[in-house]
Structures are given as structure tokens and as C-alpha cells.
């Protein structure tokens, strides 16, 4: 007892803040009087205020489960470390108690003996060990820049993307391929000059040492044949220049009005002639399609089905089919044996202005305001190609058996030649300065013509080489027609009709179309025209709701042609 009293006297006034104790308490984990602690050496020993086996006084005990002020208890009340509602420990104590070792099922956390003893005191980690300090080595700007440069150099050191060095063989092969692809059409055009010796002609008197001349023949395809001589000093002397003779125009009999056919109730916009030459078909703004007899001009059949102006008709040469298109975005196929529509071709986004049937293939081409040319399979109604490239309304389309098989004209002032297999543009002709409204194919030659408000131009297939320009018809040209005799006819929006010689461009006749009685003079406009298959009848569709038929004047006598060609022909 004396020893116990001395130890109590020695350790009684340790007070709060002692290491291993909580603020305001004595022994950690025990509910004791503030400022009193229990030394470790007296744990488990009987004291005056702590009997052996633990205190049974409510509220002052350690490791007890009796309600009251307990530590590590799970019963409600004022306690520390409890998870049940009540006054729990301060927020600052939660972190410090998390380091205590807790054994499931025991009273006080950190005890090895269930329900008894004082929790084992865990030493705190020094504050210095919880702070991660890293010394940052400071470098000069020069060192940092050098390291950045080195890092960049390492990044771009490898050159996998760099082109491989080419050998001399590859360079020569690439040069030859470029020569053939870009200059293959022109690199062999100029034939070499062949020198052949003919009779020597002395120049000057013999006393002065006359020079002999050698004739030179220039084997080129130019229209001018230059006579060149080479003297003894290998100097070229031009003797004379002879131009190839220009072709003279062929005389054509004048044309006159033969018949006027009335029957439509609106503008007659399009027509086509059957391959048998027995009848022809017209489409009008009154939404009807009419079939007429070629010889007598009588009406044979009327077809209704379009809900807007009929802008294009085409008769198939190999099928009993008639195709029509209009401003209602529809393309129809009519069976002439049953006189009804059997197919519709859907796909155009706006009005359809023209169509053409391929002469040898079962395909149909249609163009319109959607700036596209659509190629249709005639039987399956499938759209084979949508030929795009024009930037404005496509006004006309023509098809032929030879290349280019599809030719289109547009209001964007261009003519396009199409590759029907690849579905791409083969050539684009940009010579016109105004919108192009009509195309015409020559029936026997590989040439075609295009009509614009500025000029009529002739082109050569298949590459679209410019042939000549036909100026003089100063109006908005809506249509062209051409027969096998070389007579080209152009019809304008103001009712004027001009007849041209296709070979020379000589305008041998022109006149004004007469409107039918009761019509306005402003209705004297031509929308379409075409020769029949004999070439002796010209059928026109006009704005006065009539169809006019013209023929050659058999009583006309051949007269001398007063033709003065333009020697300085411009290459438009």
C-alpha cells in the first residue's frame, strides 16, 4: 500500500497534454476525472477508486457495456467512438483514433483481451514524415533551352515519312510517263522537214559566186503550204506562201411554208419523229401529247397523264415505246400498243426539260433544272448514273452510238462530253459566253453544233475540238435542226429562222415566222424544230400554239452564190 500511494503521489499531477492521453482525460480510452491518469504500471491493480476486475460504478469505467460515459461502447449515451446517435467525440479525435487497432467483437479498440484492459497506446508518427518534400533542382535558362532542343531533336530524329531517294531509272520512267500523259497528243504533231534536192537555181551572176538553192517540202497538216529554199550556207529562204483554198458553200434551194397544224391549246414545246417517218409526236403546255400523221397533218392520238407542261418527247427506234418528261418532275414511258403509261422513272428533283433515247443501248437520258443528267435503265427503271458537274439548269441532251455517247448543254455556258462507262466528264467546252439552249448532232459526220445567244458553234467528236463559229443570228436561240444535206436551221425566241450551210457557215436564207390569225406578234417564237428522216420536211413548234411544216421550193433555180468569206476567221 505504501508503494501504491507513492506512485499515485508521483503521477497524480501529470494533467492534460501528457503523451498518450486525450485532452481533458486521464488514461486513453478510460472515462476518468479530468487531469487524472492511471499509470501503465498500475493497470489491473486495485485502487481506492478502482476495484479489482473493473469498476461497476455507472459512468466511470473502462471497457464496460453498461450505459453511461463509456469508451468504445456501442450503447446509446455520451460516449467516444460510438456509431450510434448521441454526443460523439470531437472531429479532431476521429483521425487520431483511426490509428488504433480494432479487433472485431471486443469492447475497447486496440485490446487483445475482450472487454478488459486499457487500450494499447500507439505512438504517433512524426509530422515530418507525413509531408512529402522534394528538392527541386534549379537550372539555368541555357540548360533548360538545351534540354528542350535535345528533346525536340529526339522527337524528329527519325524520317520514316521522308520520300525514298529515286534512282536514275525511276526518274527517266517518271519523265516518260508525264510526257505521254500530258503531251502525248501534241508531241508528234509536227512532222520532220524532209530536204530533197531539185534543180539548182543560181543566185546572182557567176562572177560573184552564185549560190545554189535546195527546195524543201514541209510535211505538216497546216492549211498554208510554204515554199522554202536552203542555200549553200544552210540559210532558209522563204520563196512564197500559198494558203489552202477555202471550201465553197453548196447551193441549197430555199425553203417555204407548206402547212400549219392547229390542235394544241398551249405553247408547243417539243416534238420527235418516228423512225418509220409515218407520224410525229408533239408535247404542249396544255399537258397533252398528240400524235400527228406526217403526210396529211391530221391528228391520230392524244395522250393525257402529265399534270404540267410537257417539255420533252422521244420515240424509241427499237421498241414500241414513247418517252415523255415535263415540269411535273416526271419521266413516263408510254406503250404505244396499249396507249398507256407502263413505267415511271423517279429521281429528278425539279422540272425535266429534255430527254434522249440511246440508239443502240436500252438506256434513257433526261436532264432538267436540278443541274444533273440522269441515265436510266429503260426496263428496270433503275438510275444507272447521275452525271453531275453542271452548275445551272441543263437545257438539252443528245446521245449517239459513238464516243462521246452523251452530250449535254447547260445555262452555265458550258457543253460537257460524258464517259458513259465511268460516269464522269470527258471534256468541258467553255467557248460560249452565254447560256446554251440547244444541241444538234450531224446525221452522218462525227460533229455536233451548239446554239447560244451569242453564236452557233460547231464541234468535232470525240474530244470536242472547235471547228468554226457561225455568227449573225442575234437572238435567243431555242432550237437547232440539221439534215444529211448539210442544211442547218436555227430558231429564235423572236420568231426568226436562219438557214445555214453546215460546211462553210454560209447563211443562205432567213425569214420571220408568221403567227396564226388572232395571235399576238409577241407569240412568234420557236421552241423546237426537227427534220423528218427524209430531210425534205422541217417541222417547227411555235408559241402561237401551232405546228408549221416547211419544205424546199422545187421551182427554185440555182443561182450564183455571192459569198465573201471572212479571211481573218476568229478562233472563239
Image (tube, rainbow, N blue to C red):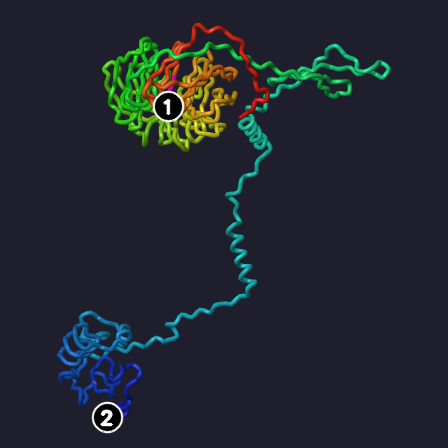
- Viewer-proximal residue, 200 or 279? 279
Q: Earlier in the sequence, mark 1 or mark 2?
A: 2
Residue 405 seen in the figure = no
Q: Which residue is mark 2?
A: 5
Q: Is residue 103 left or right of residue 505?
A: left
User: Does dot 1 land on a helix, a strand or a loop?
Assistant: helix
Q: Nearer the viewer, mark 1 or mark 2?
A: 1
- Viewer-proximal residue, 239 or 560? 560
Q: Quadrant of residue 540?
A: top left
x and y, in percent, of residue 448 in the image:
46, 19
x and y, in percent, of residue 563 in the image:
55, 14
- Viewer-proximal residue, 101 or 248? 248
**494 to 96, vertically: above or below:** above
- Tell me, yes or no, whether the highlighted magenta stretch contains residue 525: yes
- Viewer-proximal residue, 243 or 229? 243
Magenta range is: 520-529
x and y, in percent, of residue 450 in the image:
45, 23
Q: Residue at x 57, y 20 (%)?
A: 566
Q: Is residue 86 left or right of residue 252?
A: left
Residue 215 seen in the figure = yes
Q: Quadrant of residue 231?
A: top right
Q: Which residue is mark 1?
A: 521
**Label of residue 1 in the image:** none
Amino acid at each position: 500500500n505504501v508503494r501504491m500511494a507513492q506512485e499515485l503521489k508521483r503521477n497524480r499531477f501529470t494533467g492534460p497534454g501528457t503523451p498518450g492521453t486525450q485532452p481533458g482525460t486521464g488514461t486513453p480510452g478510460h472515462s476518468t476525472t479530468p487531469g487524472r491518469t492511471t499509470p501503465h504500471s498500475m493497470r489491473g491493480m486495485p485502487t481506492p477508486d478502482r476495484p479489482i476486475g473493473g469498476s461497476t460504478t455507472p459512468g466511470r469505467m473502462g471497457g464496460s457495456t453498461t450505459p453511461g460515459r463509456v469508451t468504445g461502447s456501442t450503447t446509446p449515451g455520451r460516449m467516444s467512438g460510438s456509431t450510434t446517435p448521441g454526443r460523439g467525440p470531437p472531429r479532431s479525435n476521429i483521425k487520431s483514433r483511426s490509428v488504433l487497432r480494432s479487433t472485431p467483437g471486443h469492447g475497447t479498440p486496440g485490446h487483445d483481451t475482450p472487454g478488459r484492459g486499457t487500450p494499447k497506446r500507439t505512438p504517433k508518427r512524426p509530422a515530418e514524415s507525413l509531408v512529402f518534400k522534394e528538392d527541386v533542382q534549379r537550372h539555368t535558362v541555357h540548360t533548360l533551352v538545351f534540354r528542350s532542343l535535345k528533346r525536340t531533336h529526339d522527337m524528329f530524329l527519325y524520317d520514316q515519312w521522308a520520300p525514298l531517294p529515286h534512282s536514275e531509272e525511276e526518274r527517266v520512267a517518271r519523265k516518260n510517263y508525264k510526257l505521254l500523259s500530258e503531251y502525248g497528243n501534241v508531241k508528234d504533231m509536227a512532222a520532220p522537214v524532209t530536204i530533197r534536192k531539185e534543180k539548182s537555181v543560181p543566185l546572182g551572176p557567176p562572177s560573184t559566186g552564185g549560190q545554189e538553192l535546195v527546195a524543201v517540202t514541209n510535211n505538216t497538216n497546216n492549211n498554208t503550204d510554204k515554199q522554202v529554199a536552203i542555200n549553200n550556207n544552210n540559210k532558209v529562204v522563204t520563196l512564197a506562201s500559198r494558203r489552202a483554198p477555202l471550201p465553197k458553200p453548196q447551193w441549197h434551194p430555199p425553203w417555204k411554208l407548206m402547212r400549219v397544224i392547229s390542235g394544241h391549246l398551249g405553247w408547243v414545246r417539243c416534238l420527235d419523229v418516228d423512225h418509220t417517218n409515218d407520224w410525229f409526236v408533239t408535247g404542249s403546255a396544255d399537258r397533252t401529247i398528240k400524235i400527228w400523221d406526217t403526210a396529211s397533218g391530221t391528228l391520230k392520238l392524244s395522250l393525257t397523264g402529265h399534270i404540267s407542261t410537257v417539255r420533252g418527247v422521244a420515240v424509241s427506234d427499237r421498241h414500241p415505246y414513247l418517252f415523255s418528261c415535263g415540269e411535273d418532275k416526271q419521266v413516263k414511258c408510254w406503250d404505244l400498243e396499249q396507249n398507256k403509261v407502263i413505267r415511271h422513272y423517279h429521281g429528278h428533283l425539279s422540272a425535266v426539260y429534255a430527254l434522249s433515247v440511246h440508239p443502240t443501248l436500252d438506256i434513257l437520258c433526261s436532264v432538267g433544272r436540278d443541274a444533273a443528267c440522269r441515265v436510266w435503265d429503260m426496263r428496270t427503271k433503275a438510275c444507272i448514273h447521275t452525271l453531275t458537274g453542271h452548275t445551272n439548269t441543263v437545257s438539252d441532251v443528245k446521245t449517239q452510238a459513238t464516243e462521246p455517247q452523251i452530250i449535254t448543254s447547260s445555262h452555265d455556258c458550258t457543253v460537257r462530253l460524258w464517259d458513259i462507262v465511268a460516269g464522269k466528264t470527258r471534256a468541258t467546252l467553255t467557248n460560249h459566253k452565254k447560256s446554251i439552249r440547244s444541241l444538234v448532232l450531224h446525221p452522218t459526220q462525227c460533229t455536233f453544233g451548239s446554239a447560244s445567244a451569242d453564236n452557233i458553234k460547231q464541234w468535232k467528236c470525240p474530244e470536242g475540238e472547235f471547228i468554226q463559229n457561225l455568227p449573225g443570228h442575234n437572238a435567243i436561240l431555242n432550237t437547232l435542226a440539221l439534215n444529211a444535206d448539210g442544211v442547218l436551221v436555227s430558231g429564235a425566241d423572236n420568231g426568226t429562222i436562219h438557214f445555214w450551210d453546215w460546211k462553210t457557215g454560209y447563211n443562205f436564207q432567213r425569214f420571220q415566222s408568221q403567227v396564226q390569225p388572232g395571235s399576238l406578234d409577241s407569240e412568234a417564237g420557236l421552241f423546237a424544230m426537227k427534220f423528218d428522216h427524209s430531210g425534205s420536211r422541217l417541222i417547227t413548234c411555235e408559241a402561237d400554239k401551232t405546228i408549221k411544216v416547211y419544205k424546199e421550193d422545187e421551182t427554185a433555180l440555182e443561182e450564183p452564190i455571192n459569198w465573201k468569206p471572212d479571211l481573218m476567221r476568229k478562233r472563239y
